[in-house]
Every structure is written in structure tokens, then in C-alpha cells.
Amino acid sequence: MIFIGAEEIISPLGQNIEENFQAVCENRSGISLIPHAGFNDDSMHLSKITAISDRNKFEMLLINILEKVLKQIDPEIALSKKTITIVSSTKGDLDRNISSPFTDSINAFARHFQLANEPVVVSNACISGVLAINVAGNFIKAGMYDHAIVLGCDLISNFVLFGFQSLFAVSNAPCAPFDADRNGITLGEGCSAVVLSNSKEIFKKTAFQLYTGTSANDANHISGPSRTGEGLFRSVKKTLEQNHISGNEIDFISAHGTATVFNDEMEAIAFDRLEINEKPLNSLKGYFGHTLGAAGVIETAISMQMMRNNLLVKSLGFKESGTSKTLNIATENKSSELNTILKTASGFGGCNASLVIRKL
Amino acid sequence: MNSITAYCHIKDNVCSVNGEIFLQKNEESADSWFKQLYKELALEYPKFYKMDMLSQAGFLGSELIKKTNPGLLTDYADDEIALLFANSESSADTDIRFRESYLEKKTPSPSLFVYTLPNIVLGEIAIRNKWFGENMFAVLPKFTPDFFIQYGSVLLNTGSKAVLAGWLGILEGRVEVFMFLVETENKNGYPFDAENIRKYAGF
């Protein structure tokens, strides 16, 4: 059995998991209007961390988050040869060294903690976080490691913001996942961590069981979501089948929900094809923005907090159904027994990934 | 047993398949090195010209492996071939060009931006072949045979029946590509272990 716990988040909503979950419970958003941020000096809605200076921010976030995580587990784990550290990120610290956006930060981070094994960077667009958790779980399942620390981190940079602006993919208001009036993403930055282990004894708080999932490509388009949700459909179907879990056992779906017109429509079609579209669902992008490579870890961490508190958190920004297939989107916070959650992600390159977490 | 059943290299001026030279770069040609390879393979796939160098490299490598091992197209269901790639530069080659587009040319280029993720090459190969299998792109400090052994084995134990793997070193004109195919049921290969990966990679 694979255990997962010790979730942590640093974001504009707070410096630790408690502050972040408190903000989410209060339906507060980290998104604000930042003057002169856009390509034409325009003001942009962003979820930006201002509490940490921009110098070596990526490295500082990785160090800060692991220090918080070590308070939640047996700290010896970090130094063990049987522990692998996996970092999920799309762009690392590209402003520090564009030719090698991970090397300096990851080396400094690994040296700081004297990690026994070189960290692996998973850079697979917006599924990086979910994929990294699955990779970590599979390493433990195969007996290659006993423990894994998964860190998701991405920063807002001119590079990424101007890029999404050039694609006309940025919302002119805070993003509104699955809403009829949604018109694009809001970029966010954040850092999040979870720990996986073959032993539940290393966790100071209760751990959960992780059912590692699969990834699947749409084989359709490098930057446009599939019209049929094929890759997401296949990924979730296989994840459930391989773990012998039926759709009926899912209490909640933590969707990707970027708030672009086509992505959210694709997800609705996939969940409808999977016949799980009546399950309560949210997107957390209205709270954190789209944190790209960090998103899957942040959203898994919040899902674990929702399970700890048996509280289904509302999907911020959603008012009116805006997909061709109906979804059961959480419009209010609601107390609810949450035992089994499905987390999904989809990204550029046509990639999709999913995993399941269950209470012990 | 898991076996390496085919491999290929693309370097700055030579391309080889299973250790045999496939093509040497013609320095006189007006065509780029990758276009020379595309023409030599006699492919009809105009999307090739839209790809960045990282995607072209992975695309060409996958076509070379298919050419030498046509069973890849016939012996597997559409979700049984996993794609496992890595390098140490991520998509830096195109990242540098995209940054120039907004810093120097003052117009961020959307056609460059969509290639500023290293996993796009996996999408291009999946689209070309209609493969719906597992995808993974990792950025590692250097070529690490153990990474391919570890995660390749995981993929072959979790539903994939073949792994098309590769190291795609592409940065500012330098080309260091090594791709290989790992199969579970084809016995005509070399044991899938770190020693063989290191040997055939030749790095």
C-alpha cells in the first residue's frame, strides 16, 4: 500500500497549508489586479506571491516548503538513500538561466538538505504535478524507493504571461472555471508538496492511501484540447480499472478546470463519457490561478485537506453552467463525508493524467 | 524479459540506426540537417516543417525506429506504447527564440510559445502515430541510464508493452539524440539494463 500525507502549500493565500486551506474555506482568492504586468504594460489579474522577493524565488520556495514538510514527517526520511525527491515544474527558474532552467536551483536545493539522491524533474506541461505523484508512487510500488517527496513549483514570469497573452488565452477578469462566461486562464504561482511512503508511521498526522493512476495522450493537437476528451477519458478509465475502483465510489472530483472555453468543455465531455458527471466537482483555479506545473500538487493537497475536514469546497468563479454536458459543480461549501477523491489534469502536448486518494 | 530491440543516434552531422550509418550531413546542401533526414526518410508529413528542433528530433528518431522495426506499428494496441523522454536543457532551444520574439522583435510569437514545453515532442509523436499511451518527460542534470531503467521498468509493469525512449539534447545548433525501443515480448534484442543503455548510447 502507498501512503500519502504531509501536504504543504505556499501561495498568495498563505505561507503554510493551514493558512491556505483557511483562505479556501473562506472562499478568498489569491488573484489580484497587478498594474503594468502585461506585454503592453496592461494591468493583469494574477495570483502572485509577494511575500518572497524575486531573487532565486524558485530555489527559496523549494527550500521553504521542504522545511515545512519535514516538521510533518520523520525528518530522517529526507536524507535517506531510499528516498527520491521529484520536482514538478514547467519552467523552473528560467529567468536565472534560460539555457538550463532547473540546474542551479535544484542543485542548491539538494545541497541545502544534503539529499542522498539527485532530484528528478518532471516537466510535462500542466499534468506535471499529478504525473510526478504517480511516478513517485510507482517507484515505491516497484520497491525502488521507500519514500518520495514530491514538490510542485512554478513562477509567474514575463515569458509565460506574454506567451499566454499571445495565444489570447488569458482572462480579462479573474478566471471562472466551467462558467458560461469563462474566457481564459489567470496565471498563478505557488509551491506545494506531498510525501509518499510505504509506511504510514513516518507521518505525524494521519496519512491517506494513494492509488497511482495513468497518463494518456489525446493524439490530437499539441495546444488544443481534444473535442471528445479522449485522453482524459482513457486516463481516468484506466486509473479506475487498474485500481478496481468503480465510478460510484468516487465522492468528489478535483478537476483541472483552467477556465478556457475548450478545456472545460473537453473535461465535461470526458466526465460525461465516464458517467461520473453527477459527482460533485470543483476547480481550484479561481483560488490559486493556474500554477501550471505546481497545480496538480496544490490541488491534491487541498483535496486532502477537504477529506480531513469533510468539507466540499465551492468552485470559485462559477455561476452558470457553460458546458455542453452538465456537471455537478460545487456552488457552495458543504459538509460532506469525503472518502475517495479523483484528481485529474490535462495539458499542452495533449497529455492527461489522473489519480485516486482514499481515506484509510 | 525486457529487451532493447532497436536504437538510433542523430548527432551534429551523422545519423545512424542500430550502429550503422543511415545518413551523413551534406554540408553543401541548402537544406537543414533535419530536413535532409526528413527527405531521406521519404516522408509525407508537412506538419514536420512547423515543428521546433526538439520535436523534429524526436519525430525523426521515432520514424527511424519504425523503419527498422515495422512491428512497432502492427504489434501493439494504440495505448500500449509508452513514450519516455529526457534531456538536460528542457525546451531551452525554443525558449531562447521565444524570448527574442518579445524582447527584440517586440511581438511574442504564439507559434514559438506552443513549443516552449519539452513534452510537446511527445504530443507530436502521439499525433503522428495515433498513440494514446503513457507520456513522461524528465529534465535530468546529465544522461542517466538508471533513470531509463527505473521508469522504463515501471511503465512495462503497469500496462505498457513497449517503451519508446530517448535522450533529446538540442540546444543552439548542438544535436545529441539517442533513441531506443524496449519491448517485452520480442526476444531479438539486448537485455534492457544500464550497461547496455550506456554502451549503445555511447555518451
Image (tube, rainbow, N blue to C red):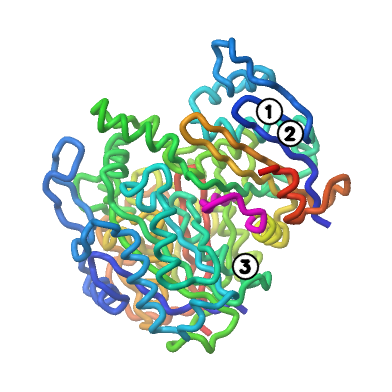
* Residue where numbered disc 3 is placed: A139
Q: Is residue A45 left or right of residue A149?
A: left
User: In which quadrant of the rendered view does residue A240 lie?
Assistant: bottom right
Q: Indicate whether residue A126 is drawn in magenta.
A: no
- Please tell me if label 3 and label 2 are on a single chain: no
Chain letter of the residue beneath label 3 in the structure image: A
- The residue that disc 2 covers is B66
For badge 3, the amino acid type reads Phe
Which marked residue is nearer to the observer: mark 3 or mark 1? 1
Badge 3 element: helix
Give the answer, above or below, for where A256 lies relative to A209. above
Subunit that carries the residue with mark 2: B
Circles 2, 1 touching at the beta carbon (< 8 Å): no
Front position in the image: A292 or A266: A292
Where does residue A40 sit, x and y in percent of width and height?
A: 16, 35
Residue at left 71%, top 49%? B198
Q: Quadrant of the C terminus of chain B?
A: top right
Amino acid type at mark 1? Cys
| Quadrant assignment for the N terminus of chain B | bottom right
Span colored in magenta: B135-147
* Label annotation for residue A338: none
Q: CA distance from mark 3 to mark 1?
A: 34 Å
Q: Secondary structure at mark 2?
A: helix
Q: Residues within 10 Å of mark 1 (few under 14, many from 20)?
A: many
Above or below residue A146? Residue A185 is above
The residue that label 1 is drawn on is: B15
Which of pointers 2 and 1 indicates the residue nearer the eye?
A: 1
Distance of mark 2 from mark 1, alpha carbons? 15 Å
Where does residue A127 sit, x and y in percent of width and height? 47, 54
